[in-house]
Every structure is written in structure tokens, then in C-alpha cells.
Amino acid sequence: MGKMENHFDVIIIGGGPAGLTAGIYLSRAKLSTLILNEGTIGGQMILTHEIANYPGFESISGYELARNIKSQAQKFGCKIRSNIKITSLDFTQEIKKVIINDEEVFTSYAVIIAMGGRSRTIGAPGEDKFKGKGISYCATCDGDFFQDKEIIVVGGGNSALEEAVSLTKYASKVTIVHQFDHFQALGHYVEEAKNNSKISFIMESEIIEFIGTEKLSSVKIQNQRTGEISEMSIDGVFIFIGYVPNTESLEGIVDLNKWKEIIVDKNLMTNVTGVYAAGDCIPKKFRQITTAVSDGTIAALNAAEFINNFKKQNENFVTS
Ligand SMILES: Cc1cc2nc3c(=O)[nH]c(=O)nc-3n(C[C@H](O)[C@H](O)[C@H](O)COP(=O)(O)OP(=O)(O)OC[C@H]3O[C@@H](n4cnc5c(N)ncnc54)[C@H](O)[C@@H]3O)c2cc1C
């Protein structure tokens, strides 16, 4: 094989905590490593103004934590390209090929997919503006910030009901707003919520607008049956209406489960040899920075082993 200009030992797709951590481990192991990230580096971390559950930092902004992890990866030689668009992926050969912006071709022996995901949003006016400023999609991350406050939980599935109960540890009052007249959650979650004196319910209703200046201060709620609209003062809104992995572009490239999460084995390898996946895009119950960082480590160490073996077995074949 001839020498290729854009060849790396490993390409990491996604520069959130999982991808950046993988970048630290692989570049520190002296493997040439490229991270390709669609948006601003840092992933979902940069959407939150305060992180209080990442070990070693009592409190740090998501932006600062992302910047620290990024510069740690770069210090070891990891190359990072942000704000790119991946336009083609070919994992059918031993040498994997990734094309960005329809023009630049990168190849590698191994790939780690760390494309993360996103919480399903309501899509009402003001939702984007108040994300992290009163609106949250994660009780474990943000519950503690709502000590003795009045909050709304949106949703009617297991997560919504379970998290509503867990949020009563902090909030003085939790109102569950649900679009239907019944819940989809399992019976025991519904019972527990109904038996909790801090929880009340607004059924057959949807939030149609989030209102505030710097922070969220109230919401407009519409009754789906009568059409009646009311405004409710509130300190925070937690939205649990589903999770979407960023895997739309991977259909037919690696195996996905019915929730569109990437199926991996215990080494975090996908069904394609040499292609690993890590972080929020794989099946898991708890989606946190610490769990993403853990996956990034495991995928990176397994990928490093895979690459070193590949190089040994193909000494006359490998690209320098
Ligand atoms: C508002 C908010 C607050 C949170 N607060 C906390 C907290 O306090 N503590 C905590 O532990 N967790 C928190 N979380 C959860 C935590 O941020 C995530 O679990 C974690 O970021 C997941 O890391 P990841 O690397 O797997 O994915 P992500 O962080 O989602 O990163 C994925 C990256 O891949 C990129 N990408 C996606 N598709 C492509 C593509 N096709 N090509 C190239 N790049 C792509 C994205 O742009 C992104 O940069 C919070 C989440 C949110 C939304």
C-alpha cells in the first residue's frame, strides 16, 4: 500500500467526554490519533453552566472542563478537527475510511465512535434559551440545584415518574405535567409518585412556552382537551420525554438496537472488527460524564491493543 497523507492509527468520531478521553489514552500510547467533531468540542458538557459531580472538581463549568480535557489530549499529540461534517464512512475494509466535508479523506486501522446523543426536546418557544438556566434533562446532574424550589417534571414514562420521585429529595414541590390522561410508566412507579405528598399532577396538558429574562421564571401550559391556557410560576422544569442517540448516519454501517443505540461487546467493539463505540451512543442506564469517560478509556485501551496486534501481523503492509 502506498503512503497516504491523511492516515492515522485511529480516528475518533465525536469530541465529547468519551471521545476526548479516548484521545488522551491513545495519543499517550504513542498512537497517531485524530478526533473529528461535528460541532464545538466538548459535546453535551458545554451545555451546562455548572458540573458538581465530576470527581476532583467541587464545581466547574462544562465549558472549562471540556477545555481542560481537550488541552490534555492535545498535549499528548492528539489532533482535533471541530465543526466538520462527516459525509462518508466506509468500514468494509481493514483500512477504515472517513470523508469530511465531501473532500478530505482520512484512513485508519481502528475507529472509535463517540457521537453521543441528545434528550428529546418539547420544541416549545424559550426551550433553547433556558436550557441549563432553569430547564434540565438530567435529575442526577441538576436536582441538587433546586433545593427547596418548586419544579415541574414533564413526561409520563418510567424515567419521568422515577425522577419525579427522586427530585422530591430536593424540591419543595414537584408538579408532573403529562400530555395524556394516563401514564405509560409501570404501575409501581405511578403508585410511588401518587403516594408522595410533594407530587401533584396536571394531566392532558403540555407546556407551550417557557418564559423568563436571564433564568426561567414561568411556563404557559395548555390543556389538550379544552384548549385552555394558563401561566404557572416555576423555578425549574425537568424534561424526560425520551433520548435520541446521534446515530442516524450509522444505519447499515454498524449494528444498532431498536432504540438506535450502537450494539457493542464487552470490549466496546461493534459488529465491525476494529470499530469501537463509547459513551452516550451505546446502551446504558446512566448517561453521565463519568460513565462516558469510563467507556472512552475502555474503548481506547482495546483499540490500542487491536492496532498493535494489527501492526505486528501486517509489518510489511502498515502505513507509516
Ligand atoms: C444540559 C445537560 C447537563 C448535563 N449535566 C451533567 C452533569 O452535571 N454531570 C454529568 O455527569 N453529566 C451531565 N450531563 C450528561 C453528560 O453531558 C453526557 O452524559 C456526556 O456528555 C456524554 O458524553 P459523550 O462523549 O458520550 O457524548 P456527547 O457529550 O454527546 O458528545 C458527542 C460529540 O459527538 C459529536 N458528534 C455527534 N454526531 C457526530 C458526527 N456525525 N460526526 C462528528 N461528530 C459528531 C457531537 O457534536 C458531540 O461533540 C448533562 C447533559 C446535558 C444535556
Image: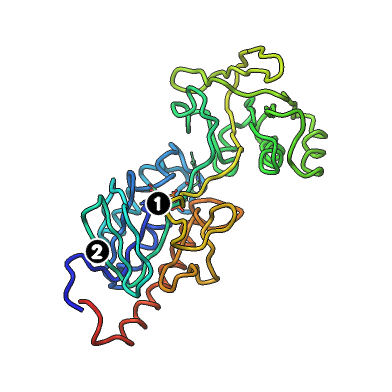
The vertical placement of 236 against 252, above or below, is above
**Secondary element at tag 1:** loop
The image position of residue 73, as x and y in percent, is: 31, 59
- Are the two marked residues, 1 and 2, in contact with CB atoms closer than 8 angstroms? no
Visible residue check, residue 174? no
Q: In the image, is the residue at mark 2 within 8 Å of ligand 1 by its beta carbon?
A: no
User: Which residue in the protein does label 2 denote?
Assistant: 77
Q: Quadrant of residue 243?
A: top right
- Precedes in sequence: disc 1 or disc 2: 1
Q: In this figure, which colouring scheme has been used for the structure?
A: rainbow
The image position of residue 135, as x and y in percent, is: 53, 30
Q: Residue at x 23, y 68 (%)?
A: 7
The vertical placement of 273 against 239, above or below, is below
Mark sitting on residue 250: none
The image position of residue 170, as x and y in percent, is: 65, 35
The quadrant in which the N terminus is found is bottom left
The vertical placement of 133 against 1, above or below, is above
Query: Label 1 amino acid?
Result: Gly
Q: Residue at x 30, y 65 (%)?
A: 97
Mark 1 vs mark 2, foreground winner is 1
Q: Residue at x 56, y 34 (%)?
A: 145
* Disc 2: CA contacts within 10 A as few (<14), some (14-19) or many (>=20): some
Q: In the image, is the residue at mark 1 within 8 Å of ligand 1 by its beta carbon?
A: yes
Visible residue check, residue 247? yes
* Disc 1: CA contacts within 10 A as few (<14), some (14-19) or many (>=20): many
User: Which residue in the protein does label 1 denote?
Assistant: 16
237 left or right of 41 in image: right
Q: Residue at x 63, y 31 (%)?
A: 154
Query: Label 2 amino acid?
Result: Gly
The quadrant in which the C terminus is found is bottom left
Between 172 and 125, the one nearer to me in the picture: 125
